[in-house]
Amino acid sequence: MIPAVKRTAAVLVVGLLIAGCGGQGASSSASPLAKPSSSPATSLPASSPGASPAPLTGAFAVLVTPPTADNYTVSIVDGNGKVVGSAQASSPTAVTCADAAGAEVPLPISMSDDRAYYMDAQGVVRFLTVQGETGRATTVPTGGGRRSTFAVSPDDQRIAVVVNDFTASGVTFKIYVEDLNGGTNHLDIYGTTGVLGLWPLGWHGPNNLVLAVVKACSQGGGPFCCGPIELHVVDPATALRRYTIGGPTCLIAGPPSAAGAVCEDTNFTRASVVNWNGVTLRTFSVPGPQPAYISPDGRSIALFNFTGAGVTTFEGSKTTLNMQTCGWIDSTHVIAGDYGQPPARIGNIVTGATTAISAKGTCAGRLPGGL
């Protein structure tokens, strides 16, 4: 599912609609925090991210070891299982809701169409390419009970940041968007206080920001406790909501892709494939709550049963793979991390073959990473 820091793979939350970031549907809106302003009061990088690398010639998975130790590792893996790039960073300081509950935050990583971006304990965001190159991109606010989460646009030009201050009763957050290189063209677009927060999951093209509505704090409990309730597609300049995917009656069942997302009804008997315009493309039956991973082209859905024997099945197919799938590399290859069923492995949905690989960690996304 959509990875979170508290556990190796985050699961779902059944909850209320968030009052912020707009109302229901494409006609809804949110009040922005402010008009365009200067850069936030944080130290900006001494060096720029530099020119974007050449377009990718293939697809890659990104694995991340849990950022619960002193350091964590980011690895880019090609379709043959080879680690083509790897980097290590200091783990961001753990945050809690005043020790009353765990603060729910995603992995400190984001993917553009050609780079993986990752954050260290000081709020420095760096990039890693498929050529193994690394560099410093920007900085985001951090420290104390504050944690920033971020999403870089597919073209490496803009970054959306949610700055969270956690308390015993929830979270106070603000969202800003600015140029990745230098922090210019800064916009504070939304902010509020409550029991629900937002994760910036990615961008659908350069002009649509995808935010996940989540419970800010959780003490765990059950397979669907601690991940996105619904997804909001918003204007990155104003926070006006354009579309909603999922909600209280159709729970987000796994990470989205460029094709959309999958949600499951509250009885966990039927799943829906929904595109980025909020349109349901098709539905299919499911035998209980289980993560659902939509392929980049939207044609295939990988399903993993919590109570099963570690087997991945696929919507409308008799193919099964002996692996705990956590994401896709391309539209015919899935990947599993090394948790639960080590070692990590890659599965071919056409041949049914699986291949063990040496990479460590859980799925954090793929390259190209645009939604």
Image: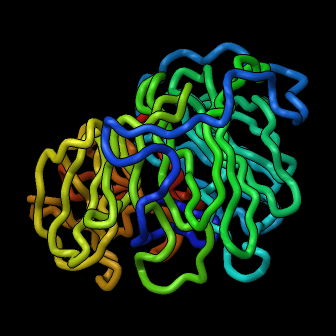
Could you tell me residue 130's position as x and y percent?
A: 58, 32
Colour scheme used in the picture? rainbow
Q: Of residues 31 and 302, which is closer to you in this image?
A: 31
The answer to whether any part of residue 107 appears in the image is: yes
- 302 or 21: nearer the viewer: 21
Relative to the observer, which residue lies in front, 26 or 97? Answer: 26
User: On the rendered structure, is 16 left or right of 279?
Assistant: right
Query: Horizontally, is 282 left or right of 165 in the view?
Result: left
Looking at the image, residue 306 lies above or below residue 349: below
Q: Residue at x 25, y 74 (%)?
A: 266
Q: Residue at x 76, y 49 (%)?
A: 88
Residue 82 in sight: no
For the N terminus, the quadrant is bottom left
> Quarter of the image holding residue 232?
top left
Q: How many marks?
A: 0
Residue 330, quarter of picture: top left
What is the x, y in percent for residue 265? 22, 69
Residue 250 coordinates in the image, percent (x, y): 27, 63
50, 29: nearer the viewer: 29
Kindly identify the residue that appears in the image at 56 percent across and 25 percent down: 237
| Outermost residue toward the front in this view | 31
Is 168 left or right of 277, judged from the image as shown? right
Whether residue 212 is situated above or below residue 105 in the rendered picture: above
Residue at the image point whose x is 16% and y is 74% from the top: 269
Percent across and percent down for residue 341 are 45, 75
Q: Quadrant of the C terminus?
A: top left
